[in-house]
Structure formats: C-alpha cells, structure tokens
Image (cartoon, helix red, strand yellow):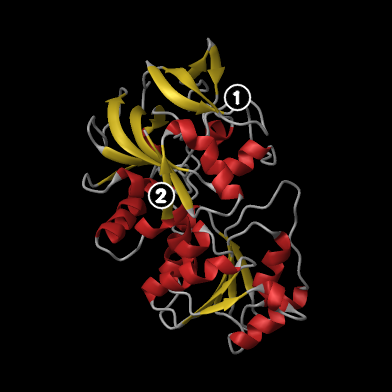
Amino acid sequence: MKSRAALAIKAGEKLIIDEVDVSGPKDGEVMVEIKATGICHTDAFTLSGDDPEGAFPAILGHEGAGIVREVGKGVTSLKPGDHVIPLYTAECRECDYCLHPKTNLCQSVRETQGRGVMPNGTSRFSYNGKPVLHYMGCSTFSNYTVLPEVSLAKIRKDAPFDKACYIGCGVTTGVGAVIYTAKAEPDCVAIVFGLGGIGLNVIQGLKMIGAKQIVGVDINPAREATARQFGMTHFVNPNNVKGDLAGYLVEVTGGGADYTFECIGNTDVMRVALESCHKGWGESIIIGVAGAGKEISTRPFQLVTGRSWRGTAFGGARGRTDVPSIVDMYMDGRINIDDLITHKMGLEDINKAFDLMHAGESIRSVVEF
C-alpha cells in the first residue's frame, strides 16, 4: 500500500515528503496507522549524522500513537482497531532481560532493529523500488508503519493521539527515570540539568512523588517560568554562577542532592551532575545521549565516597506493561502533557518542527496525519 512519509535520504539533509510503499505485516508483525508523532532530539541526532548507529535512507520517528489496521500470522495480543503506542524498547516477556527484574532492555529484536530491518532481516518500506530502512523499530514519520507485536503497547481508546504520542518517548523517559530507575522517595532533594522536554518530565515526575526540593539548571532563562509551572522550586543559570558549579549546587541543596538527572547529553555536565550529589548516597541518572566517542570522567574519590552513576533508557519502563499506566496517569490528571505540546502541524511542515527545536522555540512539536 501507499503511505505518506518523511524520508531521510542522507545525513544532514532536510526530510523529503513523498509517498512510499509499505508491505503488509508478516508473522508476528502488526501494521499501524500512525495518527500523531512527536519530533524528538534523538531524531535530530540521527539526522545530523552524529549517531553511530544512524543508517540511510530511512524513515525516522519513534514517538507515535495510532490504530492497528492489520495483524500478521501468530499475533495474539492485538487486533485491528486497537489503539497503540510504538515502542523503541520492546518487551517480549520471554528473553533473559525481560525475565530479569533489574532491567527493561529487552533484547528480542535489538539486533535487527539496530540494522533498520524487521526481525526476519528485511524492510517493509520501499521508495522508487528500493528498500528504505526502519528507525528504532518504529518509523513513525510514516502514516502507515509495521512493527513487531512485542514493540507495541495497547492503550485505552479515549486517550487523544496528539498527547499519547509523547508518551512514546519524552514523557515516559522523564517520568520513568524518577519512578522506575531512581525509584525516588517522597521528600527527596533533586537537581535536573536541562529543562527541555525530557527535563520538564523529570520535574513533573519528581513533583508527583513528593520531592521537597527540585533544582532546575539551564543556561536559557526563558525556561524558568515553564519549569516552575511543572514543579521546579529553584532555578540556577550556570552563566550566573561564579566559580565551581557543582560546589554551588551542593550549597543550594544543603549538602548535595539525593538524585540528579542529566537530560542534555553533555559529558561535562554529566560530571557536574555526579559531583552535585550528596556524599554517601547521592545517585546521578544519565538520560542524555552524548555524541559518538564521548567519554565521562570524574575523580575516583567522588565514587568511593558513596556517590553513584546510573544510566537509563526509556526511563526504565517496560513498554507493554508500564506505558498503559502512564497513559492512565495523564488521563487521570496526574501528569501534564497538554502544556508540553507547543506546536502542532501537518507532515508537510515537519522540517519546520526541527527548525523550532534547534532554535529552542518549542518544547515538543507534534505532527498529525
């Protein structure tokens, strides 16, 4: 069948809007009509050419919501008409990783997903007769896409697509880092580095669990008002701090934070985030994705005195299990997504969404099909 899509032909180039061919789902696969997709920094990272796993031509996009239109042989958990969120982190519930209580990093489709193909090693997309690669197992920049059954979370049908799509990455990554990865406690003290879409979701996750002090750190003063709306209690602009930023933050938090969250992908900031933790028990969660070849460092003293570094992917959430619960949180009014969607547009304006992101003028842009 034909599908309108935004194609990434080469790294560093604008997306091309055109029709692609999408073949039907094979065994264990599901065809989804994407109704809305968010534009995430990870898409921009891959499009820039800095992503070591980036491959072209491809259909990007991994933050979507839509409706099941067709299922392949052997699919049992989904049927046509179901509303779903694509998952770039699958949950097969059978592999060693899914059966381990300490990780959400299902490996069932990871190898083929990383190569931009379906589990049987082929693509369901083609353009002008030539194969086009999938992206993060999702490819939500196409009106129709095909995914493995294990890469789809079934959600309630009254959740609006233009909000639910954001739960496919940004909301779950931020809120999940607090409740699933850090397992932060009420009355904790936290510092959030980077007040973009991910950082704001970390903040509202902290507010939801009852953190008593939430310090936001960002060089853009325009982000202070929105961050306070979501629960930030203190704002620090590093450009206004004289001397050591980590030392200053330790002072602001009365000895250091119980938890810090790095939401930028800057290895220098990752070090500051660790060293802003409280001696003895502070934990720093790395959410941001750094460029290829980047390394983090600190003095061993910081670690042997009780601070710890942790990374998180998809906020530690198990997609098929936890994503429906986060949709419920939104529908119950426990988390705010509406105010995070600053721009909505059609597919023909998707390149404008990237421009808004790079200019720092959007929190999240959503494309509606």
Q: Which residue is mark 1?
A: 57
75 relative to 63 in the view: left or right = left
Say what amino acid the circle numbered 1 marks: Pro
* Dot label at residue 166: 2
Q: Tell me where residue 53 appears, x and y as whole percent.
A: 64, 37
Tell me if residue 308 can be seen: yes
Q: Tell me where residue 121 appears, x and y as whole percent.
A: 52, 23
Nearer to us in this view, 1 or 256: 1
Q: Tell me where residue 206 appears, x and y as whole percent.
A: 44, 72
Q: Which residue is found at the position 47% from the left and 60% from the top?
A: 174
Secondary structure of the residue carrying numbered label 2: helix
Tell me if residue 304 can be seen: no
Nearer to us in this view, 114 or 51: 51
The C terminus, quarter of image: top left
Count of numbered labels shown in the rendering: 2
Residue 297 in which image quadrant: bottom right
Q: Residues within 10 Å of mark 1 (few under 14, many from 20)?
A: many
